[in-house]
């Protein structure tokens, strides 16, 4: 499933009719197709957030939402844990892992799934 966030409004994206066709959106769909079943059970969703300026795959894990941010240009993939409430310093996200864009979609899906599984995020 894909959702789009724009101006604070969350909408479900219907495949083909109003789905974004940017490079990052296509890459997110490719990665999502290779995610193992354990990630799909974690309610994996592709998120196009124009308010925060990212496209990624969001997982609802045992310890809260985790987001795989897809880089727009020459950046790196980031796995970010979104905190339910801000911590003492006011942060709402914690970066857990960063890896370069040298991997194919299958590799990105495997790295993401194995990281989440080995750290106890997935059940």
Image (tube, rainbow, N blue to C red):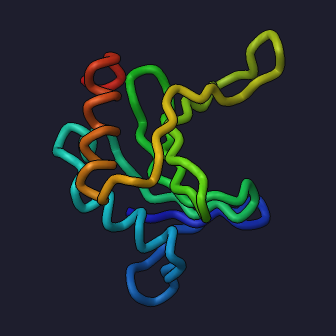
Q: Nearer the viewer, residue 26 or 100?
A: 100
Give percent across and percent down for residue 5.
65, 62
Looking at the image, which residue sits at the far top?
Answer: 88
Q: Nearer the viewer, residue 43 or 31?
A: 31
Looking at the image, which residue sits at the far right?
Answer: 89
Looking at the image, which residue sits at the far bottom?
Answer: 17
Query: Split into 4 quadrants, where in the image is the C terminus?
Result: top left
The answer to whether residue 10 is seen in the rendering is no
Q: Nearer the viewer, residue 7 or 110?
A: 110
Query: Residue 39 is drawn in which quadrant?
Result: top left
Query: What residue is shown at x 46% (from left), y 40% (from top)?
Result: 99
- 110 displayed left or right of 88: left
Query: Split into 4 quadrants, where in the image is the N terminus?
Result: bottom left
Is 44 located above or below residue 82 in the figure?
below
Give percent across and percent down for residue 117.
27, 25
Query: What residue is shown at x 32% (from left), y 58% (from top)?
Result: 31
Is 11 located above or below residue 59 in the figure?
below
- 23 displayed left or right of 93: left
Is 21 located above or below residue 39 in the figure?
below
Looking at the image, which residue sits at the far left?
Answer: 37
**Count of numbered tags:** 0
Query: What residue is shown at x 36% (from left), y 67% (from top)?
Result: 29
- 26 displayed left or right of 48: left
Is 8 located above or below residue 122 in the figure?
below
Query: What residue is shown at x 55% (from left), y 29% (from top)?
Result: 81
Query: Residue 53 is drawn in which quadrant?
Result: bottom right
The answer to whether residue 78 is seen in the rendering is yes
Query: Residue 34 is drawn in which quadrant?
Result: bottom left
């Amino acid at each position: 499933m894909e959702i789009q966030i724009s101006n604070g409004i969350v909408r479900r994206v219907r495949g083909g009719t109003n789905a974004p066709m940017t490079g990052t959106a296509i890459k997110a769909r490719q990665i999502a197709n290779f995610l193992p079943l354990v990630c799909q059970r974690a309610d994996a969703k592709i998120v196009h957030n124009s308010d925060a300026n990212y496209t990624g795959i969001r997982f609802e894990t045992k310890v809260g939402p985790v987001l795989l941010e897809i880089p727009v240009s020459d950046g790196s993939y980031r796995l970010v844990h979104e905190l339910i409430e801000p911590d003492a310093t006011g942060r709402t996200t914690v970066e857990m892992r960063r890896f370069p864009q040298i991997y194919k979609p299958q590799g990105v899906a495997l790295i993401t799934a194995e990281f989440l599984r080995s750290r106890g995020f997935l059940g």
